Image: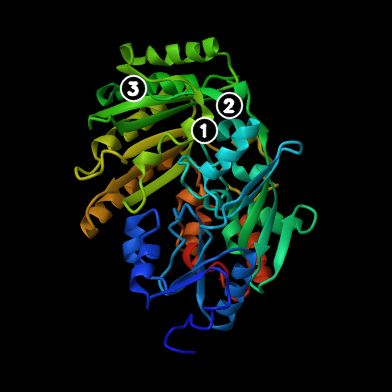
Amino acid sequence: MTDNPLSGLQGTIRGTVITRDDKEAFTAARFRGWNHDLNRRTNPLGFVVASGVRDIVTTVNYCRENSLKLTVRGKGAHSPYGMADDAVVIDLMNMTAVRVDPDTKLASIQAGANGGDIDHETALHNLICITGSVSHTGFAGVALGGGIGHLSRWLGPVVDSIVSYEMVTAKGEVIRVDAEKDPELFWGMRGNGANFGIVTEFVLKLHDMPNDGIIRSAPILWPDAKAPDVLSSWMKRIARPGRKNTETLQFAFLHSPDGHPVCGVVPLIVGETEEAAKGTCDEVAAYAGGALVRQDTQMPYTAMQAALDDCFAFDKNYWDKGVFIDWDPDNEDAVKKIISTVVEAWAAKPAFASKLSTFILLMEVNGAVAKGDPASTSFSARSGRLWATALTGWSDDDDAQRAASKKWCDDMIAALSPFHVATYLNNAMPASAEDMRGVFSEETITRLQNLKEKHDPDGMFKAGAWDYQANV
């Protein structure tokens, strides 16, 4: 090989090969990623912007033959595992087609697409599938780790709707994975799907969207000093037996547009009449002596899906950490402890933290998530009433600020450990076998290891998300 280890790949694909030799193009590709903190700390070998499946096959074969590490990212480029030092990054940013068949209610989604690409096409037919909580998040990254979104309480995780995958294997073969062709691999893909090959297309079953896609949403806000009272009332509400899964109420700490710290409840109410949905929000708005601001209104669900986009712009610094929690609603001490934990965590947020992108989110994730058959997928995060997440951003390329941001997120999750019942792979960022055992059961780990040995024995797909000793 020459000094440029990708020289033999150039000219063999229809897409673009970007190497370190082209400093301007390389820097642009590197800093196209969503998280600037990852962009600045990671130095890939180069980028292959694929035009289609054949380019991916060619690149996989080339990397295998030349012992080069591989990572994959899509248009969203959110995943912390989309780049790795001295790895070839297969970039699927041009593979974003979404084809909807309204008769069969199936969507064929290229792996580079983001949530907004999918919503744009499915909404035309009043259909929906779960995507990420920010519309510019890549769909593949969400789906391959299980897939939790705003309306998962109603529709479950993404993996419960996946019908099949098209995938390029470590041998450079293009295969279709579904429940009939390979039930064991299909099981493993649905929850740990980045470990066995490069998915190029998903086929998903879609769900009917009532009321022509109109839901009731947008925040109901109070000063953050009212948070203990709001949380107390909200926790009683979400513990009511017999609630419809089409009613989801999220709690958040955030900042108002003028920078003031506030707390809020964000309703996501699907399929109700406007009067009934407003009635639910009226009840919520009465918490803690009455809300400061009400923004709840009837809106297209696509608008709700994109509501947080501007809070999480590309090439800024971010860190987040989350865990699934549960408690006995009749245990007042448990309720008080959860409330005090998140209130104290919000008070302890770093002074330098971005007011635009610093949140504590308590997202309802029971309902359809919990009702799915746990034996049908490797997805592990089916138990728990809430997904509790701390996430923050910071402006300076300062390692001390990065460490403080990480510590803030970690500290809140550690304080919630008495209520920890499950860990969501996409929110866990495992870097070791021990970390993985915090996500999956021993039985699941064993099955996943066996699949890894069968489909990727040489560890082509260990860089990035799978840079851990899974097989020891």
Q: Are marks 1 and 2 in contact (CB under 8 Å)?
A: yes
Q: Distance between the residues labelled 1 and 2?
A: 8 Å
Where is residue 160? Give x, y as percent.
66, 42
Q: What colour scheme has been applied to the protein in the rendered image?
A: rainbow
Looking at this view, name the residue that lies furthest to the right.
180
Q: Given the image, on which type of amino acid does mark 3 rest?
A: Leu
**In the rendered image, the vertical position of residue 443 relative to residue 61, given as above or below:** above
Mark 1 residue element: helix
Q: Given the image, on which type of amino acid does mark 1 rest?
A: Thr
Residue at (60%, 68%) from the top-left corner?
56
As drawn, the label of residue 213 is: 2
Looking at this view, name the residue that lies furthest to the bottom.
1
Q: Do the residues labelled 3 and 2 touch (CB within 8 Å)?
A: no
Q: Do the residues labelled 1 and 3 touch (CB within 8 Å)?
A: no
Q: In which quarter of the image is the C terminus?
A: bottom right
As drawn, the label of residue 59 is: none
Mark 2 residue element: helix
**In the rendered image, the vertical position of residue 229 relative to residue 19, given as above or below:** above
**Residue wearing tag 1:** 302
Q: Which of marks 1 and 3 is nearer the N terminus?
A: 3
